[in-house]
Image (tube, rainbow, N blue to C red):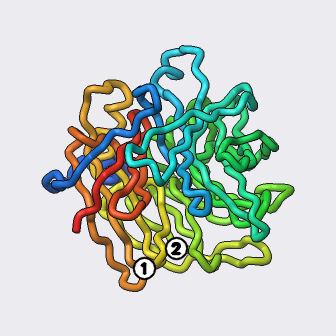
Amino acid sequence: MIFRLLKALAVVLVLAGVALYVNVRAELGQFAQIGSPTDVSVQVVRDEAGGSLDGAEDAAVDWVGRRVYIPAFDRRAAAAGKPVRGHIFVVSLDDPEFRAREITPAEPEVFFPHGTDLFREPGGAASLYVINHRGPSEAVEIFDLNDDGTLRHRETISDSGFISLNDLVVVAPRRFYVSNDHGHAPGSGFRRDLEDRFHTREANVVYFDGNVATPVAKWLNLADGVAMSHDGREIYVTELWGRTLRVYERNEQTGALTPKKKIPLGFGGDNIAVDTDGSLWIGGHPQLYKSIKRFADPSYPAPSQVARVDLAGPNVATLFWDDGTRVSAATGAIPLGDKMLLGSAFGPPTLVGIPK
């Protein structure tokens, strides 16, 4: 009898292991198909000297000043132990060549930027918030915008709730939502490895109320992009491994989030841009495992996908495909008139035509 029970238990464990393996591979896009490359113009964004903006994962648009701010950080060089520091570039929306000008302030001295957001107060003053993987702790840097578009460092905000920051959205001065893409910090060892191997859904979103960060959305499958509706009533979060978009109702007084909708994207959604009509533009990874391989090998092409999400449907419509030849491992899509700006975690950003 005991032998039969042990045998049955062994079979159950094997089947559970197989199911877990298949599920993880599916979340990484192992079985996903990609479409044919979209026939549109693709322009690599470069600096004024023609150099590359490697690691420009996110960007923020100042529509009043008609500028785009692009933090960039060479992650490969940092992983190789090279003494690198991140940069911030600015591009004028009125520049037909879309050339980036570096405006990185001297502070903070240790600067490894990631996600970013721009906030303009009712009185007109604007500030740029940038995640900084400064190690060993995570932080959010606040820069004030000068009249000429340059930046001056105002403040560094750190909190024990900042564990493995990815993206943020600012809702008021010194108040913002920020995603932790893991429940354990980089380099924390065994438990972080478990998250990466088995997708244990320990990521979250925290709300910083000006004093302390409090978790407001838990058990996410790698929380990535974060954005807010124009009326401030909804917060949007992509789950990169989960290949979904989460919609939350926001309590404007407390910052608390209530789950409202879960929308399958069909690909690993990364950063989110909210268009003027309230639709969401999401760039990301249809075959995420190839994006992971690209980190180790810069010549390895990782497919990219951009989708527009109509929340009323909801309807997810793919606008752009690429097999990684022209645009590899896209991390977001910001509509800029008849073009969109695509980020990249490992390569340069690209300006891509919007299909008609």
Q: Amino acid at mark 1?
A: Leu
- Quarter of the view holding residue 198: top left
Could one spot residue 15 in this view of the protein?
Answer: no
Quarter of the view holding residue 132: top right
Residue 311 numbered tag: 1
95 or 80, nearer to the observer:
95
Nearest the viewer among 45 and 312 is: 45
Q: Label 1 to label 2, Cα distance in Å?
A: 9 Å
What residue does disc 2 label?
247
Q: Quadrant of the C terminus?
A: bottom left
1 or 2: tag closer to the N-terminus: 2
Image mark count: 2
Q: Residue furthest bottom?
A: 312
Residue 138 in the image: state x and y as whole percent: 70, 39
Residue drawn at x 71%, y 29% is 136
Q: Residue at x 40, y 56 (%)?
A: 333
| Disc 2: CA contacts within 10 A as few (<14), some (14-19) or many (>=20) | many
Foreground residue among 5 and 327: 327
Q: Is residue 112 left or right of residue 330?
A: right
Task: Pinpoint residue 14: horizontal percent, then vertical percent.
Answer: 30, 47
